[in-house]
Image (cartoon, grey):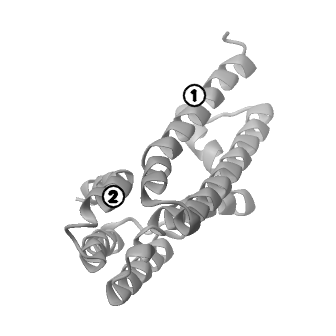
């Protein structure tokens, strides 16, 4: 059940800009808040207790509550900024406490990472922090000053394309660092 809710949240996040763009004429912001809030509440009630997961869910629920109370169309556009902030927090806090997130992911396939790889994963985690910071700032700028169509194009398509390019570029670089190309 937990995985299904997590998948529904990811899917809702990916489709959210298009739902706002195409649905704003048919649905009120409070209805978006109700759907998102239900997903985040289910996540909070069923998710594994990991550091920060409950905090993120409560912040998201607070956003949904505010969106529902204010019923504001302009507030609808801040959700991708919130998600970028969450991702920046996850990656950034992992640099300060414990093992960097990318190192944790790398250790799933190679538990005995050499020191050089540990340093590399820390750098990759920093790059992702920079990406999510810039992504959040750009999404905020588009929220404040751009037409809905531009916001939708960036938050619904371009941002994910940039994430894919960064992921693929890092993978290619990693192959080169490992000496496989």
- Residue at screen point 63% across, 28% down: 169
Say which quarter of the image contains residue 176. top right
Tell me, yes or no, if residue 6 can be seen here. no
Q: For the image shown, how many numbered marks are present on the structure? A: 2
In depth, the one of 155 and 44 nearer the eye is: 155
- Residue at screen point 69% across, 24% down: 173
Crowd class of label 1 (few under 14; some 14 to 19; many from 20; radius 10 Å):
few
Q: Which residue lies under the disc numbered 2?
A: 21
Q: Earlier in the sequence, mark 1 or mark 2?
A: 2
Disc 1 to disc 2, how far (Cα)? 29 Å
Q: Is residue 88 shown above or below 126? A: below
> Mark 1 against mark 2, which lies toward the viewer?
2
Q: Pinpoint residue 108: horizontal percent, then vertical percent.
A: 53, 38
Q: Which residue lies under the disc numbered 1?
A: 168
In depth, the one of 134 and 179 nearer the eye is: 134
Q: Pinpoint residue 148: horizontal percent, then vertical percent.
A: 43, 60
Tell me, yes or no, if residue 20 can be seen here. yes
Quadrant location, the C terminus: top right
Quadrant location, the N terminus: bottom left
Q: Pinpoint residue 68: horizontal percent, then vertical percent.
A: 32, 84
Q: Pinpoint residue 16: horizontal percent, then vertical percent.
A: 35, 58
Crowd class of label 2 (few under 14; some 14 to 19; many from 20; radius 10 Å):
some
- Residue at screen point 61% across, 53% down: 135
């Amino acid at each position: 059940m937990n995985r299904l809710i997590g998948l529904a949240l990811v899917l809702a996040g990916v489709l959210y800009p298009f739902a706002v763009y195409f649905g704003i004429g048919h649905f009120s912001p409070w209805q978006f808040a109700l759907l998102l809030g239900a997903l985040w509440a289910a996540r909070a009630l069923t998710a594994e207790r990991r550091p920060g997961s409950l905090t993120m869910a409560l912040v998201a629920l607070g956003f949904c509550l505010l969106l529902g109370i204010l019923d504001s169309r302009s507030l609808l556009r801040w959700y991708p900024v919130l998600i970028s902030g969450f991702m920046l927090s996850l990656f950034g806090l992992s640099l300060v406490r414990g093992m960097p997130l990318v190192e944790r992911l790398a250790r799933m396939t190679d538990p005995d990472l050499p020191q050089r790889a540990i340093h590399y994963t820390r750098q990759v985690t920093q790059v992702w922090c920079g990406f999510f910071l810039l992504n959040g700032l750009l999404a905020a700028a588009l929220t404040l000053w751009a037409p809905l169509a531009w916001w939708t194009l960036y938050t619904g398509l371009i941002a994910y394309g940039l994430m894919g390019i960064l992921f693929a570029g890092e993978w290619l670089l990693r192959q080169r660092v490992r000496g496989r190309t």
